[in-house]
Image (cartoon, helix red, strand yellow):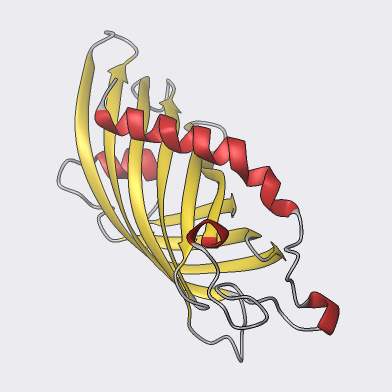
């Protein structure tokens, strides 16, 4: 098992074990006063401890149905750095399969890790809309289904765009993300087979 696969496995365990516990409303939530809850401090102004700023979850991405077929999952661990800034790391596993007669039958397995930042840039006008930037580093295993020949290649994808988050509780929300892959036309041409488009759409929960 490669280092990327090991990191992805650990992220999956963390996300699956903790994510659903965040659906409970925080005891110091300000919703009873008709106000949005603080994300980094108590109602008395004291900083929240590190553990109370963490978010765990995940999502789905890379969904294409037909030929090719593609579907991926992405566990996430995020940290509420300030009231408007979220930093995080995540993993990616994406399965892509091309079938005959329109393509050479090929299977791609993508194992990736990524770091990201989200900044709520106009909260007074459009609350919960974030500028989103990230770097995703992937190891891609390629299998020619006709000859059973296998190969592996590495790809780095800088992604920029927007995320809209619909809060469910102080530390959990439903997020719709649209990103543009700045390395879609990589010299090896692998990104085009994996991502299918320079526009990357994700649905995530954290």
Relative to 198, is 48 on the left or the right?
right
Q: How many marks?
A: 0
Q: Look at the picture and state if 81 lies above or below 20.
A: below
Relative to 38, is 161 on the left or the right?
left
Residue 92 or residue 84, whichever sits in front: 84
Residue, x 29% and y 33% (percent of image)?
A: 4
Q: Look at the picture and state if 169 lies above or below 75.
A: below
Q: Position of residue 92 (x, y in %)?
A: 42, 40
Farthest-out residue, right: 32
Quadrant, the N terminus: top left
Q: Position of residue 47 (x, y in %)?
A: 53, 74
Q: Is residue 58 visible?
A: yes
Farthest-out residue, left: 187
Residue, x 28% and y 39% (percent of image)?
A: 138
Relative to 112, is 201 on the left or the right?
right
Residue, x 44% and y 70% (percent of image)?
A: 81
The quadrant in which residue 32 appears is bottom right
Residue 130 or residue 200, whichever sits in front: 130
Residue 33 or residue 149, whichever sits in front: 33
Farthest-out residue, top: 147
Q: Position of residue 119 (x, y in %)?
A: 45, 75
Quadrant, the C terminus: bottom right
Residue, x 67% and y 52% (percent of image)?
A: 22
Q: Position of residue 129 (x, y in %)?
A: 56, 76
Q: Look at the picture and state if 150 lies above or below 123.
A: above
């Amino acid at each position: 098992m490669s280092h990327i696969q090991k990191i992805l496995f650990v992220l999956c365990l963390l996300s699956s074990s903790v994510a659903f516990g965040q659906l409970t409303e925080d005891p110091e939530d300000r919703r009873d006063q008709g106000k949005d809850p603080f994300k980094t401090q108590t109602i008395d102004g004291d900083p929240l401890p590190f553990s109370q700023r963490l978010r765990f979850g995940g999502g789905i991405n890379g969904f294409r149905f037909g030929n090719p077929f593609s579907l991926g999952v992405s566990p996430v661990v995020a940290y509420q750095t300030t009231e408007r800034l979220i930093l995080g790391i995540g993993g990616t596993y994406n399965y892509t399969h091309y079938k005959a007669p329109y393509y050479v039958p090929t299977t791609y397995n993508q194992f990736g890790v990524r770091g990201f930042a989200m900044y709520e840039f106009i909260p007074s006008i459009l609350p919960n809309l974030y500028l989103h930037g990230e770097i995703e580093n992937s190891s891609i295993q390629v299998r020619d289904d006709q000859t059973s020949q296998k190969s592996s290649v590495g790809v780095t994808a800088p992604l920029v765009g927007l995320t809209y988050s619909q809060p469910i509780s102080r530390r959990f929300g439903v997020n719709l993300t649209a990103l543009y892959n700045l390395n879609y036309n990589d010299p090896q041409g692998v990104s085009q087979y994996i991502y299918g488009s320079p526009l990357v759409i994700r649905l995530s929960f954290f």
